[in-house]
Amino acid sequence: MTEKAPYEDVVVHDNGSPPHSPAEQPAYKGPDLSHVVSAFGGDGEDAVAPRDDLQHVIGKIDEISTDEARQILIDMLKYHEYDYNFPQSTRDKMELLLEGPSDKGAEEDWSLEIRTEAALNGFYSPYPEVRAITTPDDDPDMPCETIRAHILGYIWAVIGQFTNTLFQSRFPNISLSSAVIQILLYPCGLAWAFVVPDWGFTIRGTRVSLNPGPWTYKEQMLATIIFNVSLQTAYVFYNLQTQDIFYKDKWLNPGYAILLLLSTQMMGIGFSGLMRRFVIYPIEAIWPNVLPTVALNRALLVGEHRESIHGWTISRYKFFFIVFGAMFVYFWIPDYLFTALSTFAWICWIAPNNFKVNLITGSQGGLGFNPIPTFDWNVMQYAVAPLTSPFFATAQQYFGALLGGLIIIGLYFTNVSNSAYLPINSSSIFNNTGGHYEISKVLIPGTAIINQTAYENYSPAFYSAGNLMLYGAFFAFYPLTAVFIILDAWRPLLRSFKSMFGAAADTCKRVTSGSFAVVKAVFTGRFREAGRHVHAMASYDNSIYDGFDNPLTQLMRSYPEVPDWWFLSIALIAFIFAIIILTTWTQLDTPVWTIFFVIGLNLAFLVPMSYLYAISGTTEGLNVVTELIVGYALPGHPEALMFVKAFGYNINGQADNYLGDQKMGFYAKVPPRAMYRGQVISALITALVCYAVFDFVDHNIEGICTPDQKQRFTCAASAVVFFSSSVVWGALGPQRVFTQIYPAIKYCFLLGFLLALVWWTVKRFGPQLRSAAQSSLPTGLFSILNAVLFKPLSWLKHVHPSLVFNGMLGWAPTNLSYWTGGLYMSIAFMWYLKRYKLAWWEKYNYVLAAGLQGGVAFSAIIIFFAVQWKEVDVNWWGNLVNSNTMDGGGGDAPLVRLTELPAKGYFGPDKWY
């Protein structure tokens, strides 16, 4: 075995924050420490792990025997057989170790190595991503749920919700991201610890203080979870603003608005409780998108010792602020001073009036097939998070985006459904002369009701080639994802279902028997005994962690659990609010069955969608399928469609939001009940804040949602889009669009369902078919079949079709230029550095991601208020070159293939209904 030593000895503490606790830095003095670190602590494919990872489990190596280690590896290989995130290098090493020592003289080293591998993966984590941001131990005495953590969390939640909702109606808008608030929260916590006196009181023997000491990592994480859960503008803000401004609903009042906000926001919390067993506790649910948040807070609050990793001695803390400052300065260049670097359509500059060059390579109106598309980090991470998403997810989504682009080219140049008369990749809706569809021409004035005569005299709605591909991919994505994930991940899902249904059965049994006991005690006058029975019903011995045996869940058993009925109570209250809305405000003209339908739809899709999100960091909402179904079921009911769409999208979206935050708390060992209280209270407060801001902007900003509003509160990317969507899907209806104009697109549902079956069958039974062919066919014939059929099909084992189709959804109006830069970064960081420089990657990668994100966000805010608000323009070649090309709308001709209409003066059918 070769020695690998990327580290030097610890020399000095490099941060003013408290260093790791003794639990985090085991003082193991066993004789094997130096041997283990030198032999297995390093980088490259033959290394077990970096030194820091081994430090956390070194004490476990001597506690397990060689036979136990062998069984751990066998069990892990079986459990992770179909795990997309399980490193292939780890799989190969485990299989090699299970074969035994290479020779008798190496048996002692082999025993140590197999025990080291088993300890690292069995008592820590098999995922380097997880090991980079958490530890397999906990300090339960570290202050967490303190008064100051709650207060600071709620203050920043209110500030974030107020700011994001206020500017939601502006185009372009401005928003406070989670990274920005985390950075601002940190000095607030330090200032509180420095300024506020140690005043407090005692409850049940526990002292509660305004200032329990230094601001801690767990307090920072809890406050982050509190504001993060309510940071984004509530989705139904669009409903309320559309109803108020465009539909002019006189019956709209605070009662309706607040109940709608509370119902949609809180139902997601209720559903998230049911999903814990599926996407929080399983070890394979790593939630890649939350890792930078945890890494940033660790860099800010958790001290570290100075060490050298490939010559890098800088601490995470300093590294973050250097990256943050550099990106803050640099982002001024592509965002304001030299905008051509953002959409770097250099090929179009060479031939600004060449139609095909601009169409294929352009970054604005074109398709973005450009090998060097951008130098703007904001563009690189727009479609995918390249330093966060696993490499397999980024690569497969990029392949899907590339495939989608080729399909668009095929549709466009063959003029499928008259798409060549329109811009190739627009998200707009067009009429039969190629102009934008003017919805007002087909509506009865002052209503959202279609004037059939006006509609027949005007035009049906037409989509661009990009939009046609997009909707086809959407329609295929839903059945494909549901069916494939159920088939592909049936083992972990079955374990979770067994745990959930077992808990439900125990609860029903306990409640039933307890209720009889309570009634009996009450009727016999034994009220104290009745109270004890009620308490017994609310508490039980079974753990929600049963069936999930991994280090993190074992650590979380130390804290009181959040019972399922707490979450179900929230969901029930939200459901009751929805029923009250539908039965009280009948002007919505929405039948009560729609709320049952949309809950059922979410129950059907929530598990596969959230599971995809948990393993890959990407998913899709249910808004399109909700609009389609309700549009067919309730034609001519645009406000009903908006109501159902709000629940259809928000239940799933909010549940994923809450679940991601709960996973962050899981990594940081934040007590579950503290998270629950923080999430629920934050959701309640910010729902009221959202209503107050909605009421203010709609009634106090003059000319709100009009094209010439002076401060740009035009609602161009918010309520205007929402209103247009409600008319197209609710008033115009999918029956007119997808049955008459695009009848073939509905077969994409069937395509997705069949593709899921075929893909899974080939993935699952392909190896057996190959073995059978090898044993029964002549060698020459098998070699040919193996090269042209079996070998390519074997690649499907590591490809997730939902990710491929998710990449196809990244079009109209975005294009391939938003993917290519991210792919390059993913290759560099998530593949090469993770594989060959693991020690560096674990220490710096997620801190780098957080620094880049925070720098862009802060810089964007300053640029917005400093120069964009008052339109201080810099007019020079670097900011004007794109606008002088066909791609940028400034060429000699429009970027449309067929510019001359047919002789009849329009394209498409001669009659429509």
Image (spheres, grey):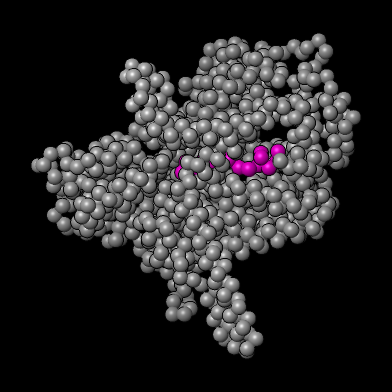
Q: Pick out the residue farthest to the right.
A: 453
- Seen as rendered, the residue at the extreme left is 105
148 in the magenta segment: no
Residue 617 sits inside the magenta stretch: yes
Spot the residue most to the bottom.
525
Disc tally is: 0
Kindly report the secondary structure that dominates the magenta region of the rendered protein: helix
Q: Please state the horizontal and vertical placement of residue 351, each as a whole percent of the image.
A: 56, 11
User: Considering only vertical position in the picture, is 168 above or below 815?
Assistant: below
Q: Quadrant of residue 843?
A: top left
The quadrant of the rendering that contains the C terminus is top right
Residue at (64% x, 47% y) in the render: 601
Q: Is residue 772 above or below residue 74?
A: above
Please identify the quarter of the rendering in which residue 741 is found: top right
Residue 496 place in picture, x, y as percent: 48, 54
- Horizontal and vertical percent for residue 686? 63, 57
Q: Is residue 158 left or right of residue 238?
A: left
Q: Is residue 343 visible?
A: no
Q: Nearer the viewer, residue 580 or 330?
A: 580
Residue situated in front as seen by the camera: 713 or 754: 754
Residue 672 shown left or right of residue 172 in the figure: left
Q: Residue at x 49, y 71 (%)?
A: 540
- The picture places residue 105, in percent across and down from the top left corner, at 9, 42
Residue segment shown in magenta = 612-628
Residue at image coords 71%, 52%: 595
Side of 641 relative to 830 (left or right): right
